[in-house]
């Protein structure tokens, strides 16, 4: 069974309104110990995100009120953010979001690809924010109870009765006997698809190697 965002998400929507002042944004990050907050409109729909990096520009930008013709577009953009005082001025837009039905694996890939540590979770019908998914929520899949992990592993195997399964801190050891080597490899691939599996140790014995490549006749 594939885990979905709703299975691990935080039910607290960490967000500020578009007109939230700089100080309130800092206070929200401190209160919830997060590195970013979602910016929402009056209807609670995410419109952007303000991160600690956005706020730090206020401190590190030395020429906040001057513009050079030699500046790059990125430098001008950073100067604008350094002078910003509200969430709407500071935010990166649009907000990258997920829904409760998003697969955890897909959410993790989104975080990795976009270099972000949290995602607002929205109601798919109203588009309103309803929670937050953090990186540490995703990593909790690797601390799942062994019984739950083993049950999910057996659920994905085509014929779980042919092998023995043992789990220890996310490492899965499978042993048994199959007819073909390709079947043993398929077992390993199936087990790796289960959320919470750290590694797979395969001790399955096969009678025949159907993966041997026969060289062409010269």
Image (spheres, rainbow, N blue to C red):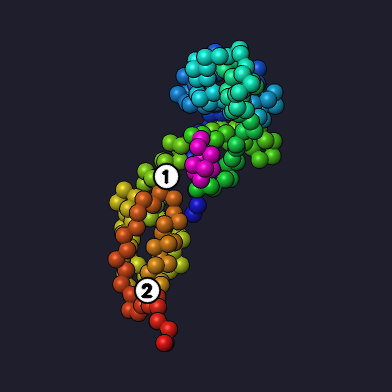
Q: Position of residue 154 (x, y in %)?
A: 41, 60
Residue found at the far front of this picture: 70
Asked if labels 2 and 1 touch by Cβ distance under 8 angstroms, the answer is: no
| Front: mark 1 or 2 | 2
Secondary structure of the residue carrying tag 1 is: helix
Q: Earlier in the sequence, mark 1 or mark 2?
A: 1
Q: Which mark is residue 141?
A: 1
Secondary structure of the residue carrying tag 2 is: helix
Q: Position of residue 121 (x, y in %)?
A: 58, 36
**Residue drawn at point x = 33 percent, y = 75 percent:** 206
Q: Quarter holding the C terminus? A: bottom left
**Residue drawn at point x = 40 percent, y = 49 percent:** 196
Q: Which mark is residue 64?
A: none
- Crowding around mark 2 (Cα neighbors within 10 Å: few <14, some 14 to 19, many 20+) is some
Residue sitting nearer the eye, 99 or 79? 79
Query: Is residue 210 something one can see in this rendering?
Result: no
Q: Position of residue 127 (x, y in %)?
A: 67, 35
- Corner quadrant of residue 15: top right
Q: Residue under circle 2?
A: 181
């Amino acid at each position: 069974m594939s885990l979905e965002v709703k299975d691990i998400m935080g039910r607290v929507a960490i967000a500020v309104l578009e007109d939230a002042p700089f100080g309130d944004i800092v206070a929200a990050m401190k209160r919830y110990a997060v590195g970013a907050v979602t910016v929402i409109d009056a209807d609670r729909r995410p419109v952007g995100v303000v991160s600690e990096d956005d706020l730090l520009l206020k401190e590190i930008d030395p020429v906040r009120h001057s513009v050079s013709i030699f500046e790059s577009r990125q430098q001008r953009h950073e100067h604008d953010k350094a002078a910003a005082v509200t969430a709407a001025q500071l935010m990166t837009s649009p907000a990258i979001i997920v829904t409760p039905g998003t697969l955890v694996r897909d959410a993790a890939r989104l975080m990795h690809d976009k270099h972000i540590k949290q995602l607002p979770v929205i109601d798919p019908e109203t588009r309103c924010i309803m929670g937050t998914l953090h990186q540490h929520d995703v990593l909790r899949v690797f601390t799942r109870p062994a019984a739950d992990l083993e049950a999910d592993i057996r659920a994905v195997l085509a014929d779980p009765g042919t092998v023995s399964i043992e789990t220890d801190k996310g490492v899965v050891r499978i042993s048994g006997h199959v007819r073909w080597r390709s079947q043993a490899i398929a077992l390993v691939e199936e087990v790796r698809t289960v959320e919470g599996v750290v590694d797979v140790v395969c001790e399955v014995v096969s009678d025949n190697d159907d993966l041997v490549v026969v060289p062409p006749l010269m």
